[in-house]
Amino acid sequence: MSSAAELKLSRVLGLAKKFNNFYLTGFQKGDIRPFLVEGQQCGLIKSDVLKQLVKYPEVFCIRDCEHTKQGLVELNPAFRDYNERTQQLEKVLRNLRSEGLFPALQGWRDEYFEVKSEHNALLKMERAATPLFGVRKYGVDINGYVIHPKHGLCIWLQQRSNTKETWPGKWDNMVGGGLSVGYGIKETAIKEAAEEASIPSHLVKNLVSAGCVSFFFESRQGLFPNTEYVFDLELPVDFVPHNADGEVQAFELLPAKECVERVFTPEFKTTSAPVVIDFLIRHGHITADDELDFTQIVELLHVPLQSLYTYKTRLEQMQKLQQQKLPNDANNCNCPNLPPVRPLENGHKKAA
């Protein structure tokens, strides 16, 4: 391999480290706390956000614990169900938005993502606020490509509208969108294909599921522990996408080599780069024979986010302490009048 080729390919690893900047270095800073809902960890909160949440002791319990040096943040367990948790959190978020303290909230969309623990939906949260709480986010991306008779593999990219709340004017995958409340994965892919690129039903039915990528990025907006469900869609050579929802200002079809170069530029959306790299690997344009750091790159496309949200729950700890007849740590919580804990028939414990 020539030195020029080595230099070029080494940029792939550099880019993979860039969109995993928090995963690689963020936990070492020591300024994050687990965020718990119903005793389950579903997020991470940094110190700048924590400074504001302490102003709402009726909503958030800020307490010390033996398992984390910084302690933890818990949504008040007195909130009994999905709707009450959502409403109480929404009040805080709207207050923070009105105060103009966080850039992320200036992109308020009135679009909601579900906050989940494994497969259980605990509440819904305004999309713009999710980076402040480090909750896992899910989306879909479609790689639209063409096998061109002259240029070979070519990939469609979109240029985001300059009025987009996030990454305005940046180049992006042909189609992409977040999983909003009430929509499934394939359903979201089909919806976004129609809205962003006007892909007709007789073509979109050829969508091929290609797994997912996951990464953990941090920006001035907050934390982005993202999982993107990926679809491939081969398109006719004469098909040209057209935007229908005003969120895209242009499309461009690029040969694979030119697409790689575009991804490395500051004009490309950083958090969409994993999808393009994954596509190029699967189609043989980035290989282990050419890339010395190939295995590390692949691993950074599939960060095990689930292993980062495994803090032992408060209820489990209390159960163990009660079994050992030791006092619990409720007095270390700043929530006023925490409800007592009572056993249920199935052995779990819940606020009375």
Image: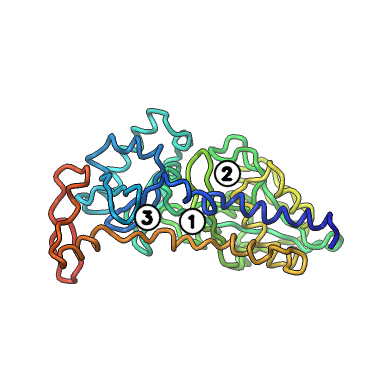
- Reply above or below: 131 against 82: above
| Coordinates of residue 311 in the picture (x, y in percent) | 35, 59
Report, in whole angstroms, how far the alpha carbon at label 1 lies from the one at label 2: 21 Å
**Mark sitting earlier along the chain (1/2):** 1
The kind of residue on which mark 2 rests is Asp
Depth check, mark 3 against mark 2: the one in front is 3
Question: Do callouts 1 and 2 mark residues in contact (Cβ within 8 Å)?
Answer: no
| Coordinates of residue 103 in the picture (x, y in percent) | 48, 34
Check disc 3 and report the residue beneath it: 42
Where residue 250 sits, quadrant-wise, is top right
Residue at x 47% of width, y 60% of height: 305
| Coordinates of residue 262 in the picture (x, y in percent) | 73, 48
| Coordinates of residue 32 in the picture (x, y in percent) | 40, 47
Q: Nearer the viewer, residue 334 or 180?
A: 334
Q: Nearer the viewer, residue 73 or 164?
A: 73
Numbered badge on residue 138? 1
Q: Nearer the viewer, residue 344 or 4?
A: 4
The quadrant the C terminus occupies is bottom left
Identity of the residue furthest to the bottom in this view: 346
The kind of residue on which mark 1 rests is Tyr
How crowded pointer 1 is (Cα within 10 Å; few <14, some 14-19, many 20+) is rated as some
